[in-house]
Amino acid sequence: MTLPPAATTVWIVDDDLGFVWWLGELLSEAGCRALPALSCDQALSLMKEVKVGIDLLVVNPQLPEVAGMLRIFRCANANLKVVAIGKASRAVTAAIRPLTYLERPSGFDPVSRPEWRQKVQKLLKEMTAPAEV
């Protein structure tokens, strides 16, 4: 499988299909190549199949096998940026070292597409900002 080049390759790994699809669509609109996976195993299998890099990982830190997947993704890109979907325990947070957190819409709360478009733009801007020392 060959994918066209894109400015930023973003992997979205979460077990909520609707959220993964919706966030992937927003990232694609922002000019990113978004690759979805519903589990860590699926993400690793897809990585072998599509053979593309990874610039940003948006991941649910509560998924099984997340630490192992992160080790493999960080081998592929030592400068990998990670965004955690939702809050996690201190131990998980220390292991994944997220750039930031992204809270998914909950329940029946109205979702503002323009607001989320801004969140995605802010996230991409933070990702490319030089690291503070």
Image: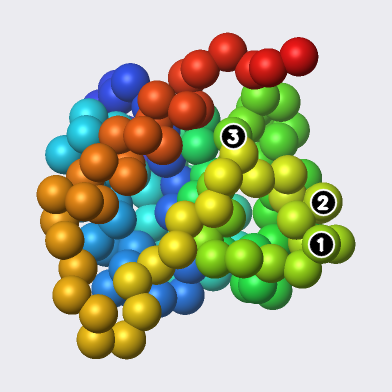
Q: Amino acid at mark 2?
A: Ala
Left or right of residue 119: residue 61: right
Q: Is residue 126 above or below residue 43?
A: above
Left or right: residue 102 versus residue 29 is right
Residue 118 falls in image quadrant: top left
Q: Which residue is more in the foreground, 64 or 26?
A: 26
Q: Which x, y percent locates residue 79?
A: 66, 24
- Visible residue check, residue 19: yes
Q: Regarding mark 1 in the picture, which secondary structure is present there?
A: helix
Please report contact status of discs 1 and 2: CB closer than 8 Å, yes or no.
Answer: yes
Q: Is residue 51 visible?
A: no
Q: Which residue is mark 3?
A: 81
Give above or below for 76 relative to 91: above
Between the residue at mark 1 and the residue at mark 2, the CA separation in whole angstroms equals 6 Å
The residue that mark 1 highlights is 90
Say which residue appears at 82% left-offset and 51% top-offset.
Answer: 94
- x, y percentage for residue 113? 15, 56
Pick whichever of labels 2 and 3 is earlier in the sequence.
3
Mark 1 and mark 3 lie on one chain; the one further toward the N terminus is 3
Quadrant of the image containing the C terminus? top right
**Local SS, label 2:** helix
Q: For the N terminus, give its image quadrant.
A: top left
Q: Position of residue 54 (x, y in %)?
A: 52, 34
Q: Amino acid at mark 3?
A: Lys
* Structural crowding at the residue carrying mark 1, measured as other residues with C-alpha within 10 Å and reported as few (<14), some (14–19) or many (≥20): few
Which of the numbered marks, if any, corresponds to residue 94?
A: 2
Who's the residue at 39% across and 67% down the image? 104
Q: Mark 1, mark 3: which one is toward the viewer?
A: 1
